[in-house]
């Protein structure tokens, strides 16, 4: 099976080489191969130039400006050719050595969607405000969508590709997590969770999510609980981003 690892990045020149080194070395389930897709979301700090070093190892898409994490992930999904899609942030908060745990249930046919739960695993450095926001969003998800997950906002999410292509995503920024969770549940899929490791970083270290994004996530959960599901269709470039795609 082929695993498409989508890495949305924006101004991560300092940590991206370490992330890519870990991703390339990360273990996968037996008989699986990696496809690494980096979506450079309009970086201005040298990330774009850095990626030229990896042109023979990964697939790279360069957006002409910063549209947001959600838009970058949507572009990555469109370009994926694997059987399974896994989302990897372009920083060091998550450990790629957890790929095996996240992917194995899908490879074994036991799940179609797997979330890596920080609250079931090893959690370090998360501020109380972030902890509380995560708990509120997760509780809201469980109430609205009839599930029993522990970590709605985790970055480590893996999906069979057919699950993602059965929905139409609209996200631009950090609302990817609540939107995809809502639509996965609306389509009737169970979300399987496995423990993962997490080491939080702060704003001064490059963390980009802000408190306002928590309110947007809550709005997204409520919106898609009651909005009719859209049929999937090819997304015109103008709906995702005014994008330019090329090797690094």
Image (cartoon, rainbow, N blue to C red):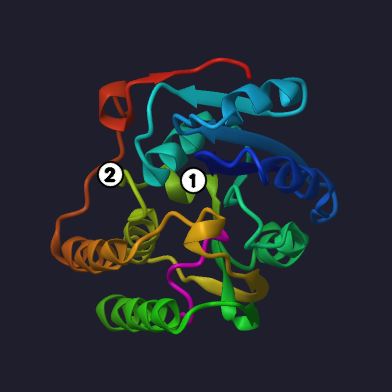
Quadrant of the rendered image containing residue 217: bottom left
Question: Farthest residue in the front direction?
Answer: 204
Percent x, y for residue 160? 55, 51
- Residue 80 visible (yes or no): no
Percent x, y for residue 123? 62, 80
Percent x, y for residue 55? 71, 21
**Disc number at residue 237?**
none
Quadrant of the rendered image containing residue 105: bottom right
Secondary element at tag 1: helix
Task: Report the mark closest to the observer, 1 or 2.
Answer: 2
Count of all numbered marks drawn on residues in the image: 2
Viewer-side residue, 24 vs 158: 24
Q: Which residues are magenta?
A: 149-157
Tell me the distance, in whole angstroms, between the alpha carbons under discs 1 and 2: 17 Å
Viewer-side residue, 77 vs 172: 172
Report whether 199 appears left or right of 41.
right
Vertical placement of residue 171 versus 240, above or below: below
Circle 2 is placed at which residue position? 170
């Amino acid at each position: 099976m082929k695993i498409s690892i989508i890495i949305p990045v924006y101004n991560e020149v300092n940590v991206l080489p370490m992330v890519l080194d870990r991703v390339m070395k990360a273990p996968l389930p037996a008989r699986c191969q990696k496809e690494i897709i980096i979506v450079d979301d309009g970086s201005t700090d040298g990330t774009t130039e850095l990626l030229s070093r990896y042109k023979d190892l990964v697939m790279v898409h360069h957006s002409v400006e910063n549209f947001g994490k959600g838009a970058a992930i949507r572009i990555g999904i469109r370009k994926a050719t694997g059987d399974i899609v896994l989302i990897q942030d372009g920083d060091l908060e998550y450990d790629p050595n957890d790929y095996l745990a996240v992917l194995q249930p899908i490879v074994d046919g036991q799940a179609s969607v797997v979330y890596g739960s920080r609250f079931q695993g090893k959690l370090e450095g998360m501020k109380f405000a972030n902890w509380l926001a995560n708990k509120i969003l997760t509780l809201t998800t469980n109430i609205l969508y009839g599930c029993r997950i522990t970590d709605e906002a985790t970055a480590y999410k893996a999906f069979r590709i057919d699950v993602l292509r059965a929905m139409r995503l609209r996200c631009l920024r950090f609302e990817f997590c609540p939107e995809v969770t809502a639509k996965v549940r609306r389509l009737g899929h169970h979300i399987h969770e496995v423990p993962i490791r997490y080491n939080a970083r702060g704003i001064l270290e490059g963390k980009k999510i802000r408190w306002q994004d928590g309110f947007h996530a809550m709005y997204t959960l409520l919106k898609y609980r009651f909005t009719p599901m859209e049929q999937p269709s090819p997304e015109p470039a103008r709906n995702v981003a005014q994008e330019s795609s090329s090797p690094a």
